[in-house]
Image (cartoon, helix red, strand yellow):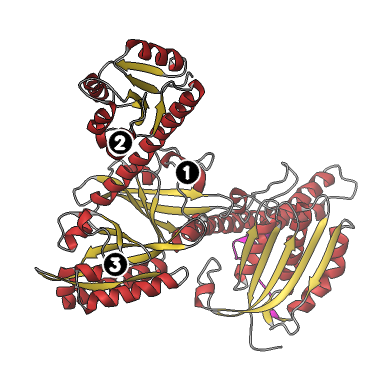
Amino acid sequence: MQAVRERVLLVDDEPQVLVALEDLLGDEYTVFTSESGERALELLAQEPDIAVVITDHRMPRMSGDEFLARLGASSDTSRILVTGFADLAGVIRAVNEGRIFAYVTKPWDDQDLRLKVKRGAEHFRLMRELNAERRLLQDLMNSVSDGIYFKDTELKFLRVNRAFARSLGAADPASIVGRRLSEISPGPESEAVEAQERRLLEQPDAEEEGLRRVNLATGSRWFSESKGRIQNPEGSVIGLAGIARDVTERVRGDEALRRSEERFREQSRVLNSVLAGMGDGAVVLDRDGGFLLFNQRAERILGVGPRRVLPSELAQTYGIYAGDQKSPMATEQNPLLRAMTGEELTDAEVFIKNQSVPGANVAVTATPLRDEDGNLIGSIALLRDVTHQRKLERQVSQSKKMEAIERLAGSVAHDFNNLLSVVMSYSSMLLKDLKPLDPLRSDVEAIRKAGERASDLTRQLLAFSRRQVLAPRVVDLNQLVQDSEMSLRRSLGENVEFVATYEGEPWPVRVDPNQISLVVMNLAMNGREAMQGGGRLSIETKNVVLDAAAAAGPLELQPGRYVVLEVRDTGGGMDVETLARIFEPFFTTKEQGKGTGLGLATVLGIVKQSGGNVLVDSELGRGTSFEVYLPACEDRE
């Protein structure tokens, strides 16, 4: 990109001089020429961006110094005066009235003139930038309603804006510059202010805020001020700056203000307490994706604190998924963004999953955020973690389903058992009537064996449906497990490490020992199947006391004392879908024909018929834990 060339104006009544100067400077600058001061003034009015003016001193009608004096402060252009005779008075006049940058005598030195023109152009650019900054500062200061002022180390005003001048009863800010407050508004209040400001100048890194009263002809006015020291790049204090706001009406109504502020503080405390203590997360979002409010509960639910992102990136940033949990929620589904479009009330349930939250169901209620004029400026949302609630709902649903299956299984097993009784009875009578070598004997024996296997199946169904006959007695659960250790170790195999940890003095439990031994064996075999490549199976017994909250949860037990038998494996664990069905009869993850799917169903039936329940905890890649809760009894027979 070609650089913009600076503009130079040549003023001389001799054409040959103009030609010579244009030849000298034309390669570097855009040159304008004028043979008179009057025409030069017109050109400057039309071309305000001329960086350098080179004018001859002696010209008819209007001399060079008169031309520069006429130009005055209306232009930032750098001025070079060319004189062919020693007219010191004219040069001095040009310096005083025309603000010349340099002067050159005829005949000029080309190199010297080029250098002065170059420096003049640089000076023009700097002055333009400086003036622009000054104008910007002045515009900014005068556009605010608060008073702004700067003072030197003698506490004299260096610069003030219009608002501050008006606060002191002055129409023109310039009338205040160079004076101290005590000179403008004499009195003890002003003297106290200046004493405080002197201390401020002497204290490192100090800032002051407070109220002061100024006595004016129209009466006393109160100002709220904030002050700070000004330091140069070397760290020396060169003055102070302050912002003052007229708070006279507020001070005059001090009592009403005090009550209002106290009420506001109380409301703020209540609001902050509510936001901090409420069980729901609360967030307020502006239309650009910035959070205006984000309470602690929201951060715990989302797992990520407030971040400024584009609204379209909210789902990706916070891991917000729809019901399918396959990909972050689309923009048109996001309840926060739907409310931001004006949808009055948006209820949705989302799934949160990110680096901090492994997975949570969150109910979102979102409404639009509007300003006092009704304009849509964002959205408000309440977030409620319903993960536990959904888990309980699934458990209740599963419990009802299992109860129905239990009733069906019990009825089927009962009726089937009656039929088996007939089959077993008649096959036994046939076997008694048939001779050992009778060709029909093998067929009848096959019928009887099939009946026996079917009878075993009905016993498992009766155990699952809690309709089998138990023979309970008071036992020590530690001893019961220890008696099974040897057979457990053999059944687990060499590639599974077996570890048992026992409660020092377990409370006695009233159970059928044979059925509880079957529970232990089924859980151990289930763990072995989950650790095909080897692993660790641990069994632990412990005494626990369930309070009302713990007992009323997924265990659905009465509060009180329980002995817990925990069986934990280090297998691959189960996903949510499998975990929801493990106690269903005939449900198995094994290949077809490799299992009946009644092992865990039998475990649950035996434990529930014994007055307890089973709690399962499992995640993919983290193994599985079964906790069997059995009610403790008082006697020790």
Residue 411 location, x and y as percent? 56, 57
Q: How many marks?
A: 3
For image coordinates 41% across by 16% down, the residue present is: 21
Q: Residues within 10 Å of mark 1 (few under 14, many from 20)?
A: some
Q: Amino acid at mark 3?
A: Glu
Disc 2 marks which residue?
89
- Residue 39 in the figure: left or right of residue 201: left
Q: Quadrant of residue 501?
A: bottom right
Q: Amino acid at mark 2?
A: Ala
Determine the secondary structure under disc 2.
helix
Disc 3 marks which residue?
225
- Give the CA separation, mark 3 to mark 2: 52 Å
Q: Amino acid at mark 1?
A: Ala
Please state which of the two labelled residues, at mark 1 or mark 2, is closer to the viewer: 2
| Residue 426 seen in this snapshot | no
Please state which of the two labelled residues, at mark 3 or mark 2, is closer to the viewer: 2
Residue 367 against residue 463 in the figure, above or below? above
- Give the CA separation, mark 1 to mark 2: 79 Å
Which residue extends farthest front? 86
For image coordinates 47% across by 41% down, the residue present is: 313
